[in-house]
């Protein structure tokens, strides 16, 4: 979760990921999101829907890849469009509010508002909207075009918040949030082949 301006290490990671994916015939467009902006979530959603629609006009088939905080937004865009030429891959992301174990303090509130100087109301609203509105609107056919990716253990995102009933979960051999995301990117070509087959 950031301000839409990648840090140097994140820019380097994106360059490496881009080269890796291009070798597998996959091109991508990065859509930066400022999760600390005071922009209403529905305005962000509409703006992202417009971007994805533009990509569909240009390329036809599009795969949304929502990473970490962006996962709930990706699912909400997918749910809004209900397009047969659209799929979604969600990497290590909270998608709903869920009951956690008593010892687990990683609530949505604690993640979104952990820094009182930089609260993320838009992230909080994105996850709650996804859980209450986007997920219930998914059809069985929609769910065939979504894959959620989880690592062995995530130290940031609680597992009960990551899954979607009726949607395939792809597990990758990673421990930790950032490392899990990195490993997940390596598996993207395989995951996209799974989506193409409709498993």
Image (cartoon, rainbow, N blue to C red):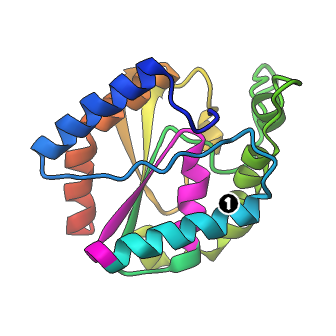
Residue 87 at x, y percent in the picture: 38, 66
Residue lying at the far right of the rendered structure: 116
**Above or below 96: residue 185:** above
Q: Identify the residue under disc 1.
A: 44
Q: Is residue 72 shown in magenta? A: yes
Total numbered labels placed on residues in the image: 1
Which residue corresponds to the image point at 25% horizontal and 28% vertical from the top-left?
16
> Is residue 79 found left or right of 103 in the rendered image?
left
Please identify the quarter of the rendering in which residue 118 is found.
top right
Residue 120 at x, y percent in the picture: 78, 38
Which residue corresponds to the image point at 52% horizontal and 78% vertical from the top-left?
81
Residue 193 at x, y percent in the picture: 19, 57
**Above or below 77: residue 19:** above
Q: Dot 1 surroundings within 10 Å: few (below 14), some, or many (20 or more)?
A: some
Which residue corresponds to the image point at 20% horizontal and 67% vertical from the top-left?
197
Q: Is residue 74 shown in magenta? A: yes
> Is residue 114 found left or right of 139 in the rendered image?
right
Range of residues picked out in magenta: 58-79
């Amino acid at each position: 979760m950031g301000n839409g301006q990648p840090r140097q290490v994140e820019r380097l990671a994106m360059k490496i990921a881009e080269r890796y994916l291009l070798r597998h015939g996959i091109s991508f467009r990065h859509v930066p999101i400022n999760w600390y902006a005071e922009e209403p979530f529905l305005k962000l959603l509409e703006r992202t829907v417009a971007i994805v629609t533009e990509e569909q006009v240009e390329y036809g088939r599009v795969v949304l890849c929502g990473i970490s905080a962006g996962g709930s937004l990706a699912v909400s865009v997918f749910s809004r469009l209900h397009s047969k030429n659209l799929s979604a891959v969600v990497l290590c992301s909270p998608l709903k509010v869920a009951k956690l174990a008593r010892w687990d303090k990683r609530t949505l509130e604690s993640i979104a508002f952990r820094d009182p100087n930089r609260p993320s109301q838009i992230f909080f609203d994105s996850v709650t909207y996804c859980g209450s509105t986007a997920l219930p609107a998914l059809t069985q056919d929609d769910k065939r075009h979504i894959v959620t990716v989880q690592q062995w253990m995530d130290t940031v995102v609680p597992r009960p918040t990551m899954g979607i009933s009726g949607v395939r979960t792809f597990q990758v051999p990673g421990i930790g949030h950032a490392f899990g995301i990195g490993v997940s990117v390596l598996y993207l070509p395989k995951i996209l082949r799974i989506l193409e087959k409709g498993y």
